Amino acid sequence: VARHGVRRALKGMSLAHSSVASTVATSPLAHRRKRVRDTSWTRASLPSRNLTASPIRSATRLSEDSRSDTLARLSLGFSGTLNTRMLRTRHGVSPRMSANDDGRPSFEEMDPEHARLLPGETSVSKNKIPVDWRATGTAFVFPAIGGLLFGWDIGVTSGALANLTSPVTSGTDWYSLDPFQTGLVVSASLAGALTASAAAAVSLGDKLGSKRELQLAAALYFLGATSQGLAPSLEGLVAGRFAYGLGIGFAMHAAPMYLSETAPSSVRGLLISLKEGFIVGGILLGYLGSYAIVGQEGGWRTLLSSSSLVAAALAVGMTTLPDSPRWIAQKGGSEEEVRTALQRVRGRSAVGDAFDQEVQAMVAQSGAGTTGGVAELFQKRNLRPLYVGLSVVLFQQITGQPSVLYYAEQVFEAAGYDSDQGAGVSVILGLFKLIMTGFAVKYVDTLGRRPLLLGGVGVMTLATAVLGACSATLAAGDAANAPITATASVVAVFMYVGAYQVSFGPIAWLLVGEIFPQRVRSAAVGAATLTNFGSNFVVSLYLPTIINTFGQAGTYYLFSSMGGVALLSIYLTVVETKGKTLEEIEEQMTR
């Protein structure tokens, strides 16, 4: 039989030679493989480890390939390395290949589950793991609703206050509020958020876990919204605002943690940035709601209480989700419990070696049953991530956002916009912010965190400098250049708002959810949330004093200089985290 096979092979030698030559000349696959073979064979040019194929079809293909290769080796095996290389691809060679270039297996010859990479490569990119959007989306949308309710409060406050303090629309006998009482109504929710952030940072957040913390936030949102709508007095309204603020504090602490600990690394940036989109969407809805109740008696009650339905949806939705798998591991849960929780939030993508390795890394790196408090944040290994997390949320507040938005309406009026359409200015800016947040959501996992931060903060710094120059020109009374200056101010406002929404807006909270070690994550995120709300409170409190001291132009220049400091800090300290698991980021940040 063997001699008969050899005779047949030798008899077909000329046919095999002509077949190979013909294939080199005509096969489209050869041309395609030529282009692939001429590349650097990076990780991206290899098939995903997560592709699956029919075992029967694969076995048949391999059987046919073996027969083809055996025949070719018998007929061409004496022709040297060039023919050997042709055999390995079975479709010819690239003219750019050298005579002693080692052949590489074709895509068809590779078993996606067991293929070995070339020297210098370690693993197939985790970005190739498919995402089950049904499971991942469900695990995203309910925590994101916590951000939506925060944005709603920002958007409705001014409209509800205007309706409440009008003798025509208030519907109360305590509508005449003095400046202190007005400030009390506005700041009560911020006071609640600060209180909740501090409680979460100290111990409560770690004890509850992000799921139960979000359920607590939902209950406080519901209680606060209902209390505001039914408030019989100023004291009752302030108490309702404080309860709602507690919900904000717990939600803004828990939501980024839950999303970062459950989302696949390939889309973690997209999802946490999209949560910022929910906040902006809530602000926009609040503006629209404020516009809808203009002239409506008691409209402020409807406006402030309507969020109770959304809070109820958040509470119900969170009951359908598991605890964070990393929190389970941190509390000493078994590997099977961690695996089950992660499978529930990953769905059909929770298979394969990469998934198993992620589960094992969670359990191994958790330090089961132990957590670190606030004091541990100041250990040497945690100082770097602590600085990065706190600095980005601090710079988020002290680089001009309150000032730019506070004076946005005046800028539009100087450009000829109708002063009676203040709500229209807010809606325009809200829509623009939503669009630019969408840009960040789309590109955060491709461009990366650092480029968006550096580019966005750079534009913010330039925009505040332009606003300072325009303010100085308008204050000088230069009538000839006033129209151009006013138009430049409007452009600068849009530049600032757009740049903020692709940088500090989403990326600050994304980094806060990513960079802290698991052992101290709850305390660290709590400290970052407290820093954010605290700096917001201080800037809002002292902004009138700063403007009175430095003037409007000087205030813009001050914020521009802070933007320069922020740029330097980001360049020197913020690392790129796209596509990495939280365990890989922890190892990188605590070296």
Image (cartoon, rainbow, N blue to C red):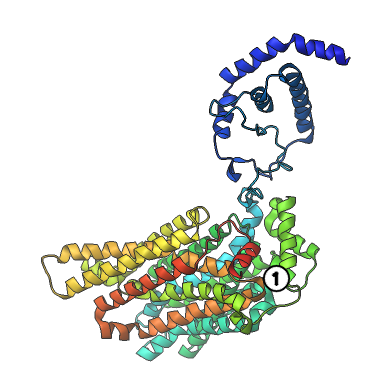
- Position above or below: 60 against 497: above
Q: Nearer the viewer, residue 21 or 253?
A: 21
**Left or right: where does residue 262 sit relative to residue 144?**
right
Circle 1 residues within 10 Å: few <14, some 14–19, many ≥20 = many
Q: Residue 47 in the image: x percent, y percent? A: 64, 40
Q: Amino acid at mark 1?
A: Trp
User: What is the secondary structure assignment of the residue under circle 1?
Assistant: helix
In the picture shown, does residue 180 fall above or below 95? below
Q: Position of residue 279 (x, y in %)?
A: 49, 67
**Does residue 517 appear in the picture of this structure?**
yes
Please tell me which residue is depicted at 18% across the width and 62% down the height of the picture.
484
Residue at label 1? 327
In percent of width and height, residue 63 lies at 79, 27
From the top left corner, tell me how far across and down residue 521 is, in percent: 62, 74
Vertical relation: 41 (above or below) 428: above
Q: Kindly indicate the quadrant of the structure image that contains residue 5.
A: top right
Name which quarter of the figure residue 312 lies in.
bottom right
- Tag count in the figure? 1
Which residue is outermost to the left? 480
Q: Residue at x 50, y 67 (%)?
A: 574
Res. 77 image quadrant: top right
Is 180 situated above or below 218?
below
Front residue (pair 123, 300): 123
